[in-house]
Image (cartoon, rainbow, N blue to C red):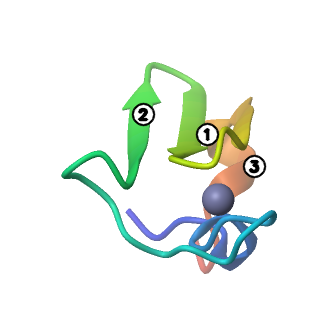
Amino acid sequence: MILMKKYVACLECGNENLGNGEGTLQIEGDTFRRTCKCGWKVETDATEAEVDQ
Ligand SMILES: [Zn+2]
């Protein structure tokens, strides 16, 4: 699945890393969730996060 590029990097600090406490990215059902170590997080509809479908 290709996810919305705007959520690849943290909108607060620009961190693109996942795992090892850097941040998380998960899909649960229809929910797309992206968090960052700085405390930023976004939760959106997974279907809206898809591109090029
Ligand atoms: Zn961040």
Which residue is drawn at the image coordinates 45% and 19% (left, top)? 29
Amino acid at the residue labelled 3: Glu
Using the rendered view, name the quadrant where residue 31 is placed: top right
Q: Are marks 1 and 3 in contact (CB under 8 Å)?
A: yes
Residue 31 vs residue 12, the one in the foreground: 12
Q: Give SS at disc 2.
A: strand
- Check disc 1: other Cα within 10 Å, few if <14, some if 14-19, many if 20+: some
Residue 48 in picture, x, y percent from top left: 75, 49
Q: Are marks 1 and 2 in contact (CB under 8 Å)?
A: yes
Mark number, residue 48: 3
Mark 1 and mark 3: Cα distance apart in space: 5 Å
Mark 2 and mark 3: Cα distance apart in space: 12 Å
Amino acid at the residue labelled 2: Ile
Which residue is drawn at the image coordinates 38% and 62% (left, top)? 1
Ligand 1, by image quadrant, is: bottom right
Using the rendered view, name the quadrant where residue 22 is placed: bottom left
Q: Residue furthest right?
A: 12
Residue 7 vs residue 17, the one in the foreground: 17
Residue 11 in picture, x, y percent from top left: 79, 66
Relative placement, left or right, of 10 versus 28 is right
- Check disc 3: other Cα within 10 Å, few if <14, some if 14-19, many if 20+: few
Give the labeled residue for mark 1: 46
Amino acid at the residue labelled 1: Ala
